[in-house]
Amino acid sequence: ENVYMNVLNSAREYAYFITPYLLISDEMENALCTAAKRGVDVRILMPGIPDKPMVFYMAKSYYPPLLEAGVKIYEYTPGFMHEKQCICDGEIVVVGTINLDFRSLYLHFENAALFCGYEAVSHVKEDFEALFPICKDMSKEPSERTRRLRLSQLILRLFSPLM
């Protein structure tokens, strides 16, 4: 989590993330929101079709505060994607097995490679740029969160560290 927060804190232009699961801590939410409010183009790409529906609906409970702060969230419309990547300002790339969720960041022994100044960084940026046009921009979607859905998401969020 510290690596991702440092990436966000040092970002000047953009920070893009791909993750299949978005169950973030308050600290990570704050880092994402703060970067976006500073004018950094922060984008999170999520799957459009989940492999774990309950986890997907929990993840959606994090959308409103992130979107309100200016974070752009995209859902990959062709289906499920299981990538875990981060790119920042065309200089730093993190690729590995680390999801943006509590278990991955705190409980599991996940691995990632950090690339800085390699040619591979530009290739990852090209991959991100090719994905955004085939995704649904959730900031342009009307909120479909009824009171009942919000309540169920809040209850589910209590269990997010276990998911």
Image (tube, rainbow, N blue to C red):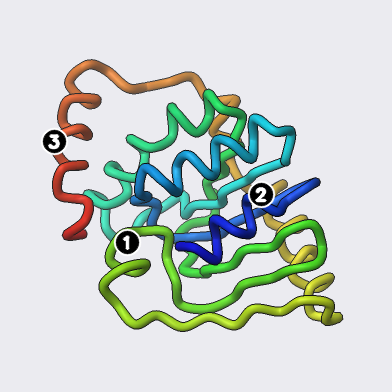
For the point 44% across and 71% down, the residue is 98
For the point 72% across and 46% down, the residue is 133
What separation in Å lies between label 1 and label 3 (alpha carbons)? 21 Å
51 shown above or below 146: below
Label 3: which secondary element: helix
Q: Are marks 2 and 3 in contact (CB under 8 Å)?
A: no
Q: Is residue 15 left or right of residue 23?
A: right
Q: Are marks 2 and 1 in contact (CB under 8 Å)?
A: no
Residue 51's disc is 1
Residue 2 x/y as whole percent: 49, 63
Packing grade of label 2 (10 A; few <14, some 14-19, many >=20) is: few
The amino acid on which the numbered mark 2 sits, given as a three-letter code, is Ile
Marks 2 and 1, the one that precedes in the sequence: 1
- Of labels 2 and 3, the one closer to you: 3
The amino acid on which the numbered mark 3 sits, given as a three-letter code, is Ile
Label 2: which secondary element: helix
Packing grade of label 1 (10 A; few <14, some 14-19, many >=20) is: some
**Residue assigned mark 2:** 134
145 shown above or below 26: above
For the point 72% across and 59% down, the residue is 88
**Residue assigned mark 3:** 155
Q: Is residue 16 left or right of residue 22?
A: right
Q: Quadrant of the C terminus?
A: bottom left
Residue 162 x/y as whole percent: 17, 59
Marks 2 and 3, the one that precedes in the sequence: 2
- Of labels 1 and 3, the one closer to you: 3
Residue 5 x/y as whole percent: 54, 55
